[in-house]
Amino acid sequence: MAAPEKLKHMVFPRHVLMGTNALDSLGQVVSDLEIENQGIVVVDATTRKLVGARVQASLAERGLTAHFYESPGPTMKSVQGAIKLGRKVGAGFYIGAGGGSVIDVAKLAAFEHGPAWVSAPTSASHDGICSGRASMKEHTGSVSVEAKPPAAIVADTAIIAKAPFRMLAAGCADVVSNLTAVLDWKLAHRLKGEEYSSFAAVLARTAAEQILENTQLIKPNIEEACWLAVKSLVVSGVSMAVAGSSRPASGSEHLFGHAIDRLAPGAALHGETVGLGSILMMHLHGGDWESIRDALREIGAPVTAKELGVPAKKMIQALTTAHTIRPERYTILGESGLTKDAAQSLCKATGVL
């Protein structure tokens, strides 16, 4: 009997440029994509001052015109504002020049409008710089929505090194959380018959292991730390492209992170919540949660509720409700989630509370 035909669409960045002063080559990278010469550059007030002039100059050198859209935040209103400007000028590309929130607005605007988008991160706080998912703020917290991977990534490590170190530590924690995401994916494959890609899983784990093996390098104001973090984030993004979903980089630890964001909005960065979540979820999997805790501690990411800035009551509530965030995504939390007693025991066993 012939095997059934399968059709799989994988979208990868055509160019990844990273290093000192990489931003000055942004125009060259965009022009190599052979797209229209009018584009929307999504920024916020801070990143426009930081890189706006350099972005505009680099694009102008290649005959490309930048129309700046200053995003007030990662909301659908911001996305629609960027699309409105994009349609008005006939934009052939979008660029997200900023942190994760700015990039999320750019990628979702490009996804809904149609053109390609380019990621130009000024910080590396999570794998959104290269992923095909966008996190939007709603009144109930953040929600992850479908978008598309960037056509190119231009990561200037000199700029990223100047961002608050907390952001880089959070980005590293986000990558480390791949370890529990992959275990959840395997579990869903075994128990629910979910499609699983060993290639994507290896990429995701490799990205995480690169962080775990080099924690001594991840220190403030060290550009080599930015190289390591960005490379790992890019590999993590590629793993999702291979899988065709966020599965290799988003499991129970991300459900926990989203639950925290809903219960205590603004208390912590995305990477910080999912990093701490990976400690808890690895304990549930019966794996080496101590090595994750120790690595995050050395990097400078939170490993306790107090360090995360979340009250104990909300920590327990997040653990008991996390399974409801994406009920279609099976994880170690199961379909019923944790009881209050189980959540308290878990937090005590890992020293989170």
Image (tube, grey):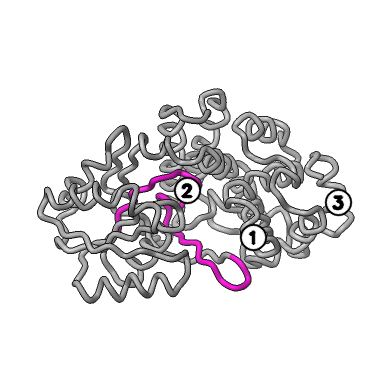
Q: Which residue is mark 3?
A: 344
Image quadrant in which you'd find residue 111: bottom left
Which residue reaches farthest top? 216
> Which residue type does callout 2 highlight?
Asp
Q: Which residues are magenta?
A: 117-141
Q: Which class describes the residues within 10 Å of circle 3: few (<14), some (14-19), or many (20+)?
A: many
State the quadrant of the C terminus. Answer: top right
- In magenta stretch: residue 136: yes
Q: Position of residue 327 (x, y in %)?
A: 66, 67
Of badges 3 and 1, the one in the foreground is 1
Q: Position of residue 263 (x, y in %)?
A: 70, 63
Is residue 250 found left or right of 67 in the rendered image?
right
Q: Residue at x 37, y 36 (%)?
A: 157
- In magenta stretch: residue 156: no
State the quadrant of the N terminus. Answer: bottom left
Q: Which residue is mark 2?
A: 127
